[in-house]
Image: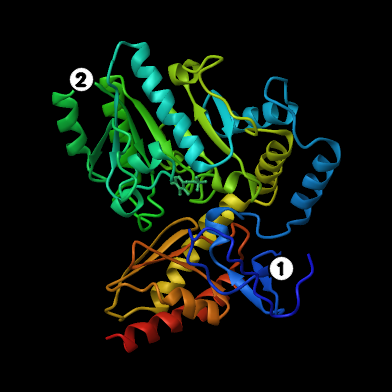
Amino acid sequence: MFFEKGFEMHSEHLMNTYGRQPVTFVKGEGVWLTDTAGDRYLDALSGVAVNGLGHAHPKFVAALNAQIAKLIHVSNIYQIAEQSALADKLAALSGMDRVFFCNSGCEANEAAIKLARLYGHNKGVDHPEIIVMDQSFHGRTMATLSATGNRKVQAGFEPLVSGFLRVPFDNLEAIKTIASHKNNVVAILVEPVQGEGGIHIPASLKAYLQGLREICDANGWLLMVDEVQSGIARTGTWFAFQHAGILPDVMTLAKGLGSGVPIGACVARGVAAETFVPGKHGSTFGGNPLASAAGLATLDIITEEKLRENAEEVGGYIRQQFLSALKDEAGVVNVRNAGMMIGIELNKPCAELVKQALAAKVLINVTSEKVIRLLPPLVMNKHEADELVGRLAPLILNFLKASA
Ligand SMILES: *Cc1c(COP(=O)(O)O)cnc(C)c1O
């Protein structure tokens, strides 16, 4: 498409589901995006944890071009070589057994929820229930918004899907209490690090996940981790559960897996991996040759360029640099990170910082009202990280001063 310089692509014919910023990007390169006026922006959001490779990564573009020229789509009623190869690779990286491919995070979680219910019915539980967390986010479909721990996501869409029991995040005792008096629970669904809820990291991710694993083992429940945001090297390990040295029974993936080509995955192990049989679940597009090639290229490039290690190192560096730039500032509650999932929590709502940052040519997000959320491309280097801190820290300090 051709755009006049400075043109904003806006249409009255789009449904009003997003409050959009008044900017239209036309191209990207690495951690930079260029708008219609030719202005360059530092991307610290990655399309919400999607563009881990940055934009227009040459190897990724070449892999996609080659696949598009060969074969974009065939039905899942045939063998798909790229899909099989991607399943093998995900199994090898995660220690899990089998993968179902779909097109998004909510679909991956739908698959997990269906799998847990079927697992329950297969062992004679008539009304299976799944434990979910406060402040969680699992998607916008009816089942996943019902599992989500945020009233705003649910309001207006009642009746909700039943069969979810909600407990506080990072609280094993609440779950043990349920285990002691309920016999129809079949699974726990949890984000190891909560993303949309405000970058909540358990006090000890290791102890929390190990504790959940023990409770699930003792009760015959499935441990299901939603790694739609935390997976694919985002937290410095391939998957966040690997910080705890445990294996879940089910893991869901999406955002970073296809670097922008829509793909989701429900990954399972042991009895959970054998639960679905033909006729129980499916997807027209899921794991088609193009999407699978995108997933394969993404995993290869992350490995070759050591982006997992980079996410750990540069993520920690960004946190340190913000800590020193914002020190002595009472309005900053804390700065936390798990690799390149970074949250800066302020003591007041700060949504207006998104617009101020846009004016300073840096793309950020505010979630849970008071938390500045940064999800930089995994390729971000320290020089670019310095640029990010240099642009954003003064805005935060001014914002706190002006609103004091
Ligand atoms: C984004 C997200 C989802 C939903 O993914 P979609 O692709 O938007 O459906 C689910 N779970 C978590 C943890 C997410 O961050």
Callout 2–callout 1 Cβ contact below 8 Å: no
Please give the name of the residue rendered at 46% of the width and 18% of the height, measured from the top-left corner: 270
- Position of 207 relative to 335 (above/below): above
Pick the residue in front: 66 or 296: 66
The answer to whether one can see residue 247 in this image is no
For this view, does 72 lie left or right of residue 119? Answer: right
Distance between the alpha carbons at the discs numbered 2 and 1: 54 Å
Q: Position of residue 340 (x, y in %)?
A: 50, 58
- Element marked by disc 2: loop
Question: What residue do we see at 86% from left, 41% from top?
Answer: 69
Q: Which is nearer the N-term, disc 2 or disc 1?
A: 1
Does residue 12 sit above or below 262 in this rendering?
A: below
Q: Is residue 41 left or right of residue 172?
A: right
Of residues 263 and 345, the one nearer the viewer is 263
273 to 347, vertically: above or below: above
Front in this rendered view, residue 91 or 363: 363
Image x and y of residue 52, in percent: 61, 54
Q: How is the image coloured?
A: rainbow
Find residue 162 and report its image quarter: top left
| Residue at far front of view | 13
Residue 31 in the figure: left or right of residue 396: right
Mark 2, residue position: 183
User: Which of the labelled discs sits on residue 107, or is there none?
Assistant: none
Q: Amino acid at mark 2?
A: Asn
Q: Quadrant of residue 39?
A: bottom right
**SS for tag 1?**
strand
Instruction: Kindly identify which residue carries mark 1.
Output: 26
Check disc 1 and give the amino acid type.
Answer: Val
For the point 46% across and 42% down, the residue is: 227
Horizontal side, residue 165 vs residue 254: left or right: left
